[in-house]
Amino acid sequence: MVKTSSAQESKDSIPDYSYFLEQLDSGNTDIDYRLFRISYLYSEDFRNKGLRYDTLKRVVYDNIQKEDYDAIIEACNEMLTYDYTSMFAHKYLQHTAKIIGDSLLYHKHHDIEFGLLKSIVRSGDAKTCASAWEVTQLEEEYFILRMVGAQLKKQILEGGCDKMIVKKDRQRAVYYFNVYYVFLGRKLLYNPQLLEDESDTVNNVGLNELLIENIEQLDELIANLILSNGDTIKISKEDIDGVYQAEDGKISIQLNDDMTIHAATDETSRALRAILSDFGIDLIRD
């Protein structure tokens, strides 16, 4: 069962993350994967995810090269203790299980991976912001782009969506991702008191109001961006009067020769910086 509606859900309408874990642990993979992904944002596991999860990705890549299948399974299982909605972990568990001939493990994680994937790609056609694929974490965007064989060239925050300009089949293409729940996750992460609010306040808190008090935390972050493909990409930024913006009034974070993330200033730039902080970026002053 894959729910395809992208309507915003109230907190009270979403089952607890632990409910979905119990269903999957019992062998029932016929769940609402969209609500499962959203429920994760309200969980303690989401708040505790941290950098260990990204470290484990590199462990997986290293052991793929070594063909150490036990180590791959161990690392992926540990990743799932931090985030059971991780398509990355389920993907490499099912791939590894197929190689070693573990049919039960293969089918379980194959079904979960594609249940998660379908809950995103059936939410729209990704051709416009209005029909964008709905994601709950940035990692999902990069995972899907790799699945469709697209090479990211530029990422722009536009009208509540990530506009991903890519190269696919030697042609320029554009995919839109609805990042409402990505921002909601940041709200919950930086304001855990919202989890105790029984009303829908969590869905109505202004992004500008919410994130402004957390901006100073970003100055101490390390100067690398760890993308979900395992690469480490150096970044730089231009600083004018203590505000992270470029001459055209937009924040611009250069990733490489032809990949730049843009966002408007004020609440959008603050949101972008808050999101990037999760990936360990230091916005270095020139």
Image (cartoon, grey):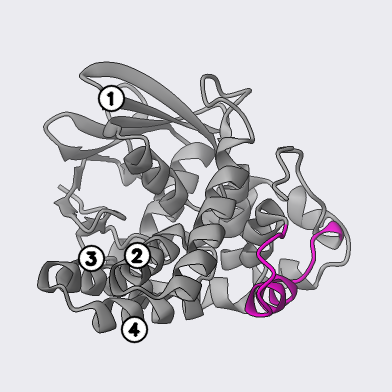
Indicate which label's residue lies in the foreground, 3 or 2: 2
Q: Position of residue 213 (x, y in %)?
A: 53, 60
Cα gap from disc 4 to disc 3, whole angstroms:
28 Å
Q: Earlier in the sequence, mark 4 or mark 3?
A: 4
Which residue is most to the top?
171
Tag 4 residue = 74
Mark 1: which amino acid?
A: Lys
Query: Can you identify the residue that label 1 sits on?
Result: 168
State which tag comes first along the sequence, 4 or 2: 4
Q: Amino acid at mark 3?
A: Ile
Please tell me which of labels 3 and 1 falls first in the chain. 1
Q: Nearer the viewer, residue 41 or 183?
A: 41
Q: Is residue 86 above or below residue 80?
A: above
Q: Look at the image and give the residue range highlighted in magenta.
A: 13-31
* Residue drawn at 25 percent across, 71 percent down: 60
Front residue of 189/213: it is 189
Mark number for residue 210? none
Helix, strand, or loop for circle 1? strand
- The structure residue drawn at horizontal position 74% and vertical position 37%, both measured from the top left corner, is 5
Q: Position of residue 116 (x, y in %)?
A: 56, 53
Q: Which residue is mark 3?
A: 222
Q: Do residues under tags 3 and 1 come within 8 Å of each other at their CB atoms?
A: no
Residue matched to label 2: 92
Q: Quadrant of residue 165?
A: top left
Residue 269 location (% of width, % of height)? 44, 40
Using the image as rendered, state which of residue 70 and residue 261 is in the foreground.
70
**Other-residue count near label 2 (Cα within 10 Å), few / some / many at <14 / 14–19 / ≥20:** many
Asked if one can make out residue 251 in the rendered structure from this viewpoint, the answer is no
